[in-house]
Amino acid sequence: MIDRYIANFKSKSTVEKFDIIIVGSGIAGLISAYYTPPQFKVGLFTKDKIEESNTYYAQGGIAVALAPDDSPELHFKDTILAGADFNEEKIVRIVVEEGIDRVRDLIKLGVNFDKKNGLSFTKEAAHSRKRIIHAQGDATGYEVACTLIKKIKDKENIRLFDNHMLIDILTLDNQAYGCIFLDSETNKISIHLSSYIILATGGAGQLYLHTTNPLIATGDGIVSAFRAGARIMDLEFFQFHPTALKIDAPQRFLISEAVRGEGGRLINFYGERFMLNYHPLGELAPRDIVTRAICFEILETQKDVYIDLRPIGENKIKRRFPNIYKKCLEYGIDITKDLVPISPAAHYFMGGIETDEYGRTSIRNLYACGEVACTGLHGANRLASNSLLEGLVFGKRCIDAILNDNPSLISEHDENLNLKEIENEKSLKEKIQKLKTLMWDKVGIIREESKLKESEREIIDLMEEINGVYMKNRNFFEYKNMLTLSLLMVRSAILRKESRGAHFRIDFPTSKKEWRKHIIWEKDKEVIYREVNSPPSFKKDH
């Protein structure tokens, strides 16, 4: 039912050959491009404009152990604790230690982090120290992305391709050698060949009805890698951010975790501060716990939940959170005076393409970094502000690996494809909305076996409707990817008969020792299990 390719193509569609193709323009893709030596010809492809990524919208900051009272060891312990003891410890150590140098590199590049007697640090949920550095108050991702984009545009060996959606990855004998793209401006399919490919395509928040992710986040990189034969891991672990502004929009505005770190309080409709009923850390409990607490509070009261920023003080709110202040005013909410209605929203995918400590996947010369990858850093629940740090560390590590790996032998070959091209269907957007609603209702914050199995059947029915056909249309390719990823997520959630981190089963509410193992999928193969703190599954096979 899951096709190898989702569009017909011919080798004569080949446009250009590169040494390295990088797909994605968030922090992981940008930093990979920055660290690429000048002798490599690079094609940097992005689905929309180069600025459109989760990085661009990241408010909170970057977690890094640079404060005098902090250390990589403390950062390591906090990451493990938040990750529900499901993290790959080797990976955590790499990130908390090497991340320090990568952040120093950003500072040398000109990223203007906020300062107060040196770097200004703030605290976020589940961190034992103030270790989050930020820029322009609550516009860290924007500042980092803009700085890196400017540097990359100055590099003569890098060619930028906007509005190019990754459709599929070309492989031969388990070796990646090119990518198929849809140019959404010309609506043409093209092939670009390369000795090495780095996927940095981000996450998949748009699988859900309510998300903080931009419209581009539909899991394309994960699913195209899966179709090519790569292994994907931990798909049942999707993090829901507890505090998104409650508005009717396809991308919900995030109220940063840093707000609670600075003293913001969660209160219910009756003005009661409820978080201490759920966890001794109150508002600063790990994200999965805060999210479920808000969810239960809304279910119990059948009323809205709010975040109260007033204890922070008007001057500090305007200085520390200028972006949040401005955005909320657009919706008629003055955060210095008013309570802010919030609800959870899909935010970050802990699952993704299984990689080793250098971003290598199970396919030779295909690498992955950032949210599209699953290194095991985040375990079952990501510690706040570790994502930008991960992108920095593994974006560079992918380049380090390429400098030591032999290139793919680029070959051109046609596939005997007979997918039937059909006219654009008017009901496509309705079908996408149906899938997003199904995922939100049945595969969301609180899960249960009968609902999961219902969703599995419904997704299979939707997949069968478009089996063997394609439309030359970005929405269609996104929908096809979303269906495949949703099905694999549901099957992972059904298999994991326990609750751990972001995966909460109301019918199995506790964690179980026997489930301290990763669930891994490979196309047309049986499910693979891998013990936590063991080598990548594809390294065991060789």
Image (cartoon, grey):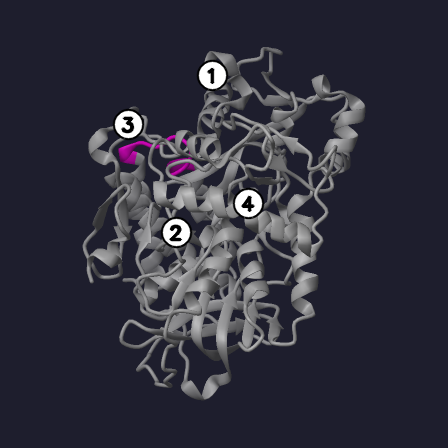
Q: Does residue 480 belong to the magenta stretch?
A: no
**x then y, percent, for residue 532:** 27, 41
CA distance for labels 3 and 4: 33 Å
Q: Does residue 444 belong to the magenta stretch?
A: yes
Looking at the image, is mark 4 or mark 2 earlier in the sequence?
4
Q: Quadrant of the N terminus?
A: bottom left
Q: Which residues are magenta?
A: 441-450
* Quadrant housing residue 238: top left
Q: Name the amino acid, label 4.
A: Ile
CA distance for labels 1 and 3: 24 Å
Mark 1 highlights which residue? 300
Q: Secondary structure beneath disc 3?
A: loop
The answer to whether marks 4 and 1 mark residues whose Cβ atoms lie closer than 8 Å is no
Q: Name the amino acid, label 3.
A: Ser
- Closer to the eye: label 4 or 1: 4
Residue in the image at 62% along x and 22% along y? 306
Residue in the image at 32% along x and 73% along y? 175
